[in-house]
Amino acid sequence: MPSTCEIIVPIDKSQATLKVAGLTVLMRLVLGACQAGFQQITISASNADSIVDGLRKDKRTQGVTITSDTPDIGVPRLVVEANVVISNEVWKILAQAKENLNVSSAPLLRVEGYAGDTTQESRLVASAYVIPVRSRTDAAVAKQTIFANVTKKTSGPVSRHLNSLISLPLSKFLCEFGVTPNQMTLFTTIIGLLSAWFVSRGTFIALALAGLLFQLCAALDRVDGELARSTFTASEWGAWIDTVADNFVYLAFIVGLTVGYHEYTSSRGLLVADYVYPVGSITLILAVFLIASMGIYLKLNTEAGTMTAVQSDMAQRVDREHAGLVYRFLDAIQLLGKRDAFSLITCIIAVLPWLTGNPFGFHLLFWLALLIVILVIAYYGLGLLNIKRQ
């Protein structure tokens, strides 16, 4: 594979400086090359030295040699003119190239130094793209394409079809102002804690507000990831920050729900009030146990920092033929326990008492929290017992 990427700045430098989703075309190419694993990036331009100095100051380029020196003739290298936006899928193929390539939508992409004819690339998947950017209109098209492909493949249906209606427009707006994923994680956490505070009030209107904020929190939770992937700021550390923040909100909501449900039942002299704090404490302890176990599993078995990786990794390891009926049933309904679906269900149940005046939703939400935690623990526990013997 070529270890050097030569980026040629066009004579019309305005093309390289056009911004796409908060980053110039040139910076997108440099960061894409860094992420693809190129060890050296050469900038060919009339003012290459000043461009190189600016690129070296960016923390995202650390560990990669950026130079203005002309590459040796005959050394295999990827050559690309700085007027295109390239998806990660295409970058990976270009970084692994062992012969000259021709990407039909951007014929200026080529690998030099290898013997052989130029070939048509046939391994590109549907989400791959190479978009020429020579005007603001092209930049707008490129931005739209980036965000059309920014959703994680592991996202649930509620996240893809409902929560994205809030997160994607917000991400498109925020990326132009340099808002970082961690800043968005902090804001989302505040919204989540505010929902926990409202649910602790123990009234129908407060419960409804808590449910709406909890659902909003789930939608906003997409934004930090969308910003990270669209601006090349994704990191394992950032993923762990997001995971810790998400689970802190979950635990805070359980505490708030317990306090609020006790406030509601005790104020009305219901017998169930005597059992609220014991059951709420059990739910909280089980939730902490579940979260800690999943965190340990992540560290031991994956390199990811997101809890969704636990289910994905375990699904590959479980011997489904001998897993049993209970595990297969839990696996079939596990989508209901994912963040997007769980938040929507919580929101609907929380709003019902305010809309109907019937307290059934308040009772259901409290006991459902315990049931879901127990079911998730059972799902992963049975999964561990049925992991394929290596």
Image (cartoon, rainbow, N blue to C red):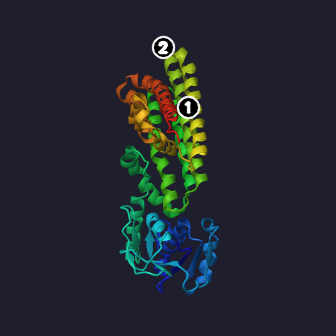
Nearer to us in this view, 44 or 328? 328
Q: In the picture, residue 54 is in which quadrant?
A: bottom right
Residue 107, horizontal then vertical, whole percent: 39, 79
| Residue receiving disc 1 | 287
Q: What's the distance in space between the residues labelled 1 and 2, CA to CA?
A: 26 Å
Secondary structure at badge 1 equals: helix
One can see residue 198 in this view:
yes
Residue depicted at 42% across the width and 65% down the height: 143
Q: How many marks?
A: 2
Q: Amino acid at mark 1?
A: Ala
Quadrant hosting residue 45: bottom right
Residue 390, given in percent of the width and then of the height, sits at 53, 42
Q: Nearer the viewer, residue 114 or 126?
A: 114
Q: Which residue is mark 2?
A: 270
Judged left or right of residue 381, residue 322 is left
Q: Position of residue 213 (x, y in %)?
A: 47, 40
